[in-house]
Image (spheres, grey):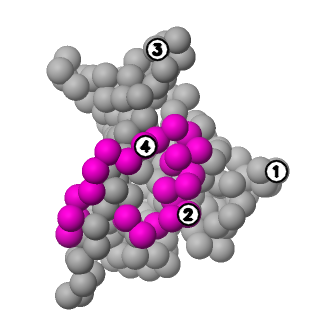
Amino acid sequence: MDQRITYREAVSSDAEALLEFLKAVGGESDNLTFGPEGIPFSAEQEAAFLNRLAESPCSRIFLALDGDRIVGNGSVDGTANPRFRHRRNLAIAVRRDFWGRHIGTGLMARMIAFARQTGAEILSLEVRADNTRAISLYRKFGFVRIGTYKRFSRIGDEYFDADLMLCDLPEQARA
């Protein structure tokens, strides 16, 4: 792992930098659910969102930082709804110039630890079916492909499938 990279939970004061990161990473890869436009939040909306996450018992955003620069993020999304609180959905993004430096591994380890600590039993994610680099990372953490979502995303006139992947956390490792 890159020793210069630090990891922590996102806080409301990260809102502006996180939005800029999402625009940058969205412009570097077609593997995300957004492009160079990023996500349609103002800095104030993003700060409010991050404050709500800090209060959530089962959702967080984690950051990978090179100094003060955000170079990766990962989200754990869950609900307190009793019928679904055993599940979490994960997503991850890393700046292209930091690919291959195990930042995805560092983020996944932290997200899975948080999910376990908060009672998750099942983790899920969607990944573009041709994103072999990400699929390899997810398999390393125990995710298996359970199906394909045909025409999951569209860029211009071209459709892309996504693999649906699950990780059933071992019962002995659950908090």
The residue carrying mark 1 is 3
Name the N-terminal-most of marks 2 and 3.
Answer: 2
Q: Which residue is mark 2?
A: 133
Q: Quadrant of residue 76?
A: top left
Amino acid carrying mark 1 in the image: Gln
Of 123 and 62, the residue lying toward us: 123
If you read the primary sequence from the N terminus, does the residue marked by circle 3 or circle 1 appear first?
A: 1
* Residue 23 is one of the magenta-drawn residues: no
Residue at disc 2, secondary structure: helix
Q: Residue at x 49, y 78 (%)?
A: 28
Which residue is under mark 3?
A: 171
Nearer to us in this view, 87 or 129: 129
Q: At 31% from the left edge and 29% from the top edge, which residue is drawn?
A: 87
The residue segment tinted magenta is: 128-152
Give the SS element for disc 1: loop
Q: Nearer the viewer, mark 3 or mark 1?
A: 3
Q: Which mark is residue 82?
A: none
In this view, 57 is above or below 69: above
**Image side of residue 162 versus residue 132, left or right:** left
